[in-house]
Image (tube, helix red, strand yellow):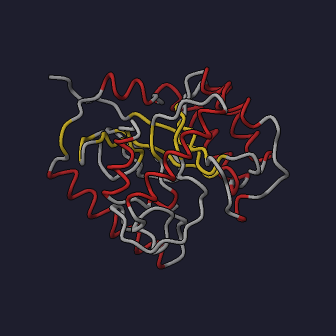
Amino acid sequence: MRKSPAKAQYLLRFDDLCPTMDRARWARMAALVARFGIQPILAVVPDNRDPELEHDAADEGFWEQMRALQNSGATIGLHGYRHVCAAGGRSLIPLHRRTEFAGVARELQREWIGRGLTILRANGLHPRIWVAPRHGFDRRTLRALRAEGIGLVSDGFAMGPFRSEGVVWVPQQIWSPVEKSSGLWTICVHANSATDETVGALEDFLERHSFQFTSVDRVLAEWPVSGRSLRDRWFHARMIWRLRLRKFRGRLRVS
């Protein structure tokens, strides 16, 4: 039976990537990826219609850059469809009242996912993992993803990958670098809002721990994947409570 690695491992995930993102801030993140040889998850919005993600004029070189990173080992994530969070359904990760997918009719979710995949594939990308805007998705979303051939989700609170609802979940639990002794930890970074402090903290962490960073492919090859354990269920409940409390106090942006 495969055993979890003894030492902590990290995945790096960049959210809200689209042609109109903040190019200067993204360039600093991309430079760190290249310098340390990281193979991140790139959460790409197929057809952005969210004004909050319109920081620059559309970059004609965006898709080429995403293809180059993909060729270097990055995993492309389907980050919703248009990133317009207008639905009010209850998500499987209940952190936000308004999301893009949770609560939307099954047929419409399947249509949006299909359109999103078509756009990314038309631009030479091969999306393999689902990254929901604002953690917003439900069981209908997962059924639609399976029907479209996507069996991986970057979300959930656990110490390692697990299988649930017919898909494999690669957990995402932190939004800034934190030293851990064991487990698999996905650090979610929003390049559009990254400050000098954010970049500096990530650079410092990579200088000390780059050898512990892994990739989605390596996780699937090296980590055991089974049902969520009682320990992980307890961890999930504790994380939901803590994040809601921090969000209420205005100390953390969870998206």
Instruction: From the top left corner, tell me how far across and down residue 8 is, in percent.
Output: 36, 35
Q: Where is residue 39 in the image (x, y as percent from the top left)?
A: 55, 28
Residue furthest right in the image? 57
Quadrant position of residue 14: top right
Q: Along the line of sight, which residue is nearer the eye, 14 or 148?
A: 148
- The image shows residue 24, relative to residue 246, as above or below, that is above
Percent position of residue 145, x then y: 39, 45
- Pick whichever, 182 or 45, lies toward us: 45
State left or right for residue 132 relative to residue 23: left
Q: Which quadrant does the N terminus fall into?
A: top left
Horizontally, is 109 left or right of 253 in the view?
left
Q: Residue farthest to the bottom?
A: 248
Residue at the image position 68 percent from the left and 45 percent from the top: 200
> What residue do we see at 46% from left, 59% from top?
108
Vertical position of residue 65 compared to residue 57: above or below: above
User: Residue at 26% of width from left, 41% of height from top?
Assistant: 162
Asked whether, in this view, residue 248 is left or right of residue 181, the answer is right
Q: Position of residue 24 (x, y in %)?
A: 81, 45
The image shows a total of numbered marks equal to: 0
The residue positioned 53% from the left and 67% from the top of the image is 252
Is 13 placed above or below 134 here? above
